Image (cartoon, helix red, strand yellow):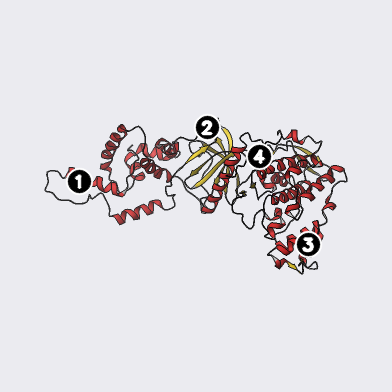
Amino acid sequence: MPHNRRYTSSERDSRSSYQDRYRDRGRRRRHRRSPTFSSSSDREKDRDRRGRGHRQEGSYVRSRSYDNRSTDHRAFDRRYCEGYRRLDPSRDRERDREPHAAADSYYSRDFSPNMYDYRRRKHKRRRRRTRSYSPSSSRSDSRTRALSVRDDEEGHLICRSGDVLQERYEIASTLGEGTFGRVMQCIDHRRGGAPVALKIIKNVEKYKEAARLEINVLEKINEKDPDNKYLCVQMYDWFDYHGHMCISFELLALSTFDFLKENNYLPYSIGQVRHMAYQICLAVKFLHDNKLTHTDLKPENILFVDSDFTMSYNVEKKREERTVKSTAVRVVDFGSATFDHEHHSTIVSTRHYRAPEVILELGWSHPCDVWSIGCILFEYYLGFTLFQTHDNREHLAMMERILGPVPSRMIRKTRKQKYFYRGRLDWDESSSAGKYVRENCKPLRRYLLSEAEEHHQLFDLIESMLEYEPSKRLLLADSLKHPFFENSGVGEATGTKSWEGNRDISR
């Protein structure tokens, strides 16, 4: 098979004239363009037709791995590109049967078949002169590889089970899909065939930029916590695959929300809530101590390490109920995480877990994460969301119904005066929305499922986390010393040691 090198239009013209000069030697000196080449406009139209629907070649960003095993130039290796094409066996059979037809279908129409031998000989001589490939030859080869990489209408990478990325990640199945892209379960052949989660970002610039920021945060977390003692998800590797930012993570199980949903929203037991709460506080305290705010804490972003469960039958409700065997969790999704010195967006957090200072646009910092944790713990304990709303005014009304009036100081300082009238929330309790809030919300302590001391301790912890004033809200360092966690053994259960000295990772 002729070699798969392509030439730019300028190189083709120069080589054509070179061949013509030798072919026309001995004739009367007359220069004309080789009939095998079309005009430049025709060539451009032909390129447009061939390129339609395909990805334009992009510069590769070399994979950066924390096991120091992806720092080679395998992404540029011609053998990998040929191996990628060999995934289509029908093309191989056709090429074996009709080599010239296969070559014509693969190469540009600008080349005539009688020129292949000439270019092949030239390339062989070039390869004998050097033992490594130049960047230009790598780019020309990546062009042919790009023809096999396509996106769907939304910008997702089109891939299926069995495809291999970076000569390393073999796709096994799809774990989930979001607005940012997809998460695939893959076999990592450089980690002994270990399963990993590969997050493949859409080829959309705003999502790619968010992925770059997430990679920066994850690199700093790995730098500070290489042994993964502080329960944030561990990143193994990242790379740019034809415009798709890809991040490789440790493979985790269901999120705490998905398990709750599949269990018919049966709440977790008080002991399970205690263990998960301690781990979340520990992980987020690690972030805060290193000048980082997560900004998007919610049950969907707390994942079980292993979501295996036991099944029991509830005679009263006449249904089977699941109990997770291990409540070890990890905090994930750092796409919105923000260092203290970085720009702070006006609105952060998913609606139901959004702190009042964010709604009132008073500025936010670490305490907004603490508010989110308080909402999460309530949801674990009851099985439903504390603030089930999608409107700012209604959200504030729910807060007042559950936690009491918004402090006057916050009302005076906010620019959102449209929500208030004469220093009080502008809210009509006789409206349909007012009736909904009145019927679905009640003072926090009335949600207690038991009068046992540990239940009251949990609600005391939640109340301290749902303090309106950010400056008065509980610090996570203090939360770990809360009576709810005392004499429970959760510190030992997490497998963590005493807190180490702080080290700033924000720069």
Residue that carries the numbered disc 3 in the rendered image = 436
State the CA–CA distance, disc 1 to disc 2: 50 Å
Which x, y percent locates residue 136?
36, 42
Disc nearer the start of the sequence (4/2):
2
Earlier sequence position, callout 3 versus callout 2: 2
Q: Earlier in the sequence, mark 1 or mark 2?
A: 1
Q: Residues within 10 Å of mark 1 (few under 14, many from 20)?
A: some
Q: Secondary structure at mark 1?
A: helix
The reply to whether callout 3 and callout 1 are in contact (CB within 8 Å) is: no
- Taking the view exactly as shown, the residue that stands out farthest to the top is 192
Helix, strand or loop at label 2? It is: loop
Q: Is residue 435 above or below residue 107?
A: below
291 up-or-down from 78: above or below: below
Q: Nearer the viewer, mark 4 or mark 2?
A: 4
Q: Confirm or deny contact between disc 1 and disc 2 (CB under 8 A).
A: no
On the picture, is 62 further left or further right than 423? Answer: left
Q: Nearer the N terminus, badge 3 or badge 1?
A: 1
Q: Residues within 10 Å of mark 4 (few under 14, many from 20)?
A: few
Residue at position x 72%, y 43% in the image: 281
Whole-angstrom CA distance, mark 4 to mark 3, is 46 Å
